[in-house]
Image (tube, helix red, strand yellow):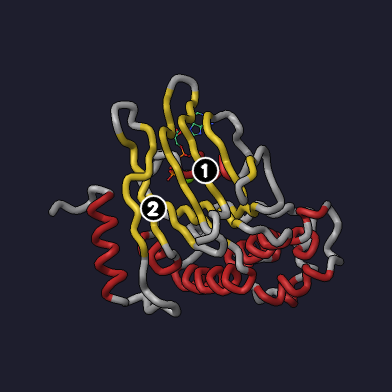
Amino acid sequence: MSAPLLDLRVSDKHYDTRTIIERLTLSIRRGEIVSLVGPSGCGKSTLLRILAGLDRDFNGEILLDGRPQQGPSNRIGVIFQEPRLLPWLNVADNVAFPAGPRRGNDPRVGSLLAEVGLAEARAYLPKQLSGGMAQRVAIARGLFSEPDLLLLDEPFSAVDAMTRMRLQDLLLSLVRSHGTAALLVTHDLDEALYLSDRVLLMTPSGKTGAGRIVREIAVGVERPRDRRDLLLASLRGELLEGLGAVTV
Ligand SMILES: Nc1ncnc2c1ncn2[C@@H]1O[C@H](COP(=O)(O)OP(=O)(O)OP(=O)(O)O)[C@@H](O)[C@H]1O
Ligand SMILES: [Mg+2]
């Protein structure tokens, strides 16, 4: 089996005197989709910020293709809860922003915008977009530098249920066609199970109450998946149990 794309080891991560994450390891293979679920405050966003190279104040290491990684890399794209578009740049310039402030003429922009269904919107300003459109621009921007890994922190939590399902399918087809691996933080267990090859459950554990991965669920359901699949429903039960939301 080939070496993992990403290997993360966090011995510990503190904020002041509080231990936020402790003894956590995580590997992601090339092209794999992994979700991270867990209660509010258990350290999911902190973990994503570490992986994105935005927080280097931790003990541990990040290996990308076996090489130590320090600081942000164009091989890792990040998509946040809110689109974080620059309001004074049009859609095309926002998508190409990883290359610089006014690079909207880059030929990759047109094909990415077509892929996210926004070919006609390249000259729009962010204020002219709906929430779902803005998040599609953010997805296109996340893919602009052709990353090997996309990190997504609750990317669809601000849109309505129908848009959310469409964006999930869009994400799935994009990561498949680009061969990108994805690590998705979500509170939506159905979303995690529908999209992922593996779902990791993170909870506050041990004496310190620091975040650790306590359970891993492999989702062995073939794609395309049916959201009503009974195996997905039973895995959902397993996750709920792990979250302490059901008693057995
Ligand atoms: N900059 C910071 N300074 C001090 N404490 C912080 C900081 N950022 C986060 N924390 C604390 O670290 C813990 C983990 O926060 P984090 O944002 O990673 O949680 P999360 O799992 O993403 O939660 P949610 O599901 O609500 O987004 C929380 O207790 C939070 O209060
Ligand atoms: Mg968070």
- At label 1, which amino acid type do we have? Leu
- At label 2, which amino acid type do we have? Leu
Q: Residue furthest top?
A: 17
Q: Point out the image quarter for the C terminus.
A: bottom left
Q: Which residue is mark 1?
A: 8
Towards the viewer: 127 or 18: 18
- Look at 24% across and 67% down and name the residue there: 234
Q: Which residue is mark 2?
A: 200
Q: Residue furthest front?
A: 1
Q: Residue 109, position in %: x, y?
A: 77, 68
- Look at 35% across and 50% down and name the residue there: 201
- Look at 41% across and 60% down and name the residue there: 198
**CA distance for labels 2 and 1:** 14 Å
- Look at 29% across and 56% down and name the residue there: 239
Question: Going from the N terminus, do you reach mark 2 or mark 1 first?
Answer: 1
- SS for callout 2: strand
Graded by Cα atoms within 10 Å as few (under 14), some (14 to 19) or many (20 or more), the crowding at tag 1 reads: many
Q: Residue 99, position in %: x, y?
A: 81, 54
Q: Is residue 194 left or right of residue 103?
A: left
